[in-house]
Amino acid sequence: MNALTGGEATPNLLTMFADVDSSSTSTRAEMFRVRGLTKTYGTSEAEVHALAGVDLDLYEGELVVLLGPSGSGKTTLLNNLGGLDVPTSGELRYRDMDLTSADEDFLTRYRRESVGFIFQFYNLIPSLTALENVALITEIARDPMPAEEALELVNLGERLDHFPAQLSGGEQQRVAIARAIAKRPEVLLCDEPTGALDVRTGIVVLDAIERVNRELGTLTVIITHNAIMADMADRVIHFSDGRVHHERRNSKRAPVSALNW
């Protein structure tokens, strides 16, 4: 798999997906089925209803932007989809698996084998090189790609032996992306992946995420409060007060370079 070429910004290649139609979900297999999902924290007067009856379907190969303000429940939903937390009630199915009643051993295997996570902060190990940070995941995955290949996919093939302190913020986030995809997950969950980055660097990171989605066919869910990202998605799901408020489908996915920052 060839790497993107160039330095931190690659605007000449960001237009490569400009005219690709957004595929209908009717031709894709359902990966997640969510019905009436709730998550409540605390008890009595201190109860917080983070999720208040979420209905949602997610499909193979989609790139979905989950858009909503801080405190709307986006991260709670992402944590439930990724098996980092369990709902209070409702239906949450991943393919033919019921995640609502799964025990911790099952959820551990699910996270290890099926889900990649990208967070706002990179969580790299400072004493390890970029290659070593990614290789950690390949040691526990069933069918990993070589760590070098994962780093080349995010345009870091020439930075394999650099430590996190020697990398820019955008490069560190791309190492985190490479680490997440090295185990070939079916689902990539991204929680404000550009939140700690400037606009120029964020564009490079979003391009890397989009490329992973298109080349690997990974269901990709990006949660953000930044409405600018909406046009790069197949679907935009607007989240408010712990539930889906409305959604829209883009007829075409805009290239990252065309987003109006």
Image: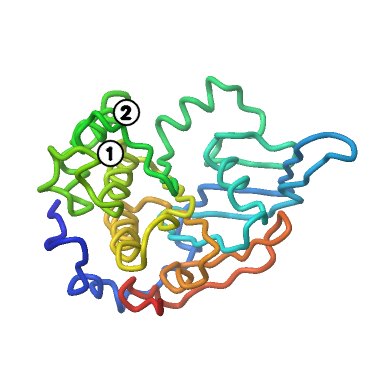
Image-based side of 121 in relation to 142, left or right: right
Which of the two discs, 1 and 2, labels the residue nearer the N terminus? 2
Residue 2 falls in which quadrant of the image?
A: bottom left
- Classify 252 as above or below 36: below
Label 1 crowd (10 A; few <14 / some 14-19 / many >=20): many
- Classify 136 as above or below 243: above
Q: Amino acid at mark 2?
A: Ala
Q: Residue furthest front?
A: 165
List the residue tagged with mark 1: 182
The answer for how far apart the CA atoms under marks 1 and 2 are is 8 Å
x, y (%) of residue 45? 89, 40
Label 2 crowd (10 A; few <14 / some 14-19 / many >=20): some
- Classify 87 as above or below 209: above
Q: Which label was assigned to residue 26?
A: none
List the residue tagged with mark 2: 141
x, y (%) of residue 147? 20, 37
On the rendered image, what quadrant is the C terminus found in? bottom left
Circle 2 — which element?
A: loop
Image-based side of 51 in relation to 67, left or right: right
Residue 175 falls in which quadrant of the image?
A: top left
- At a point 31% along the width and 79% down the height, the residue shown is 19
Q: Residue furthest top?
A: 105
- At a point 28% along the width and 39% down the height, the residue shown is 182
Query: Colour scheme in the image?
Result: rainbow
User: Marks 1 and 2: CB-CB under 8 Å?
Assistant: yes
Q: Amino acid at mark 1?
A: Ala
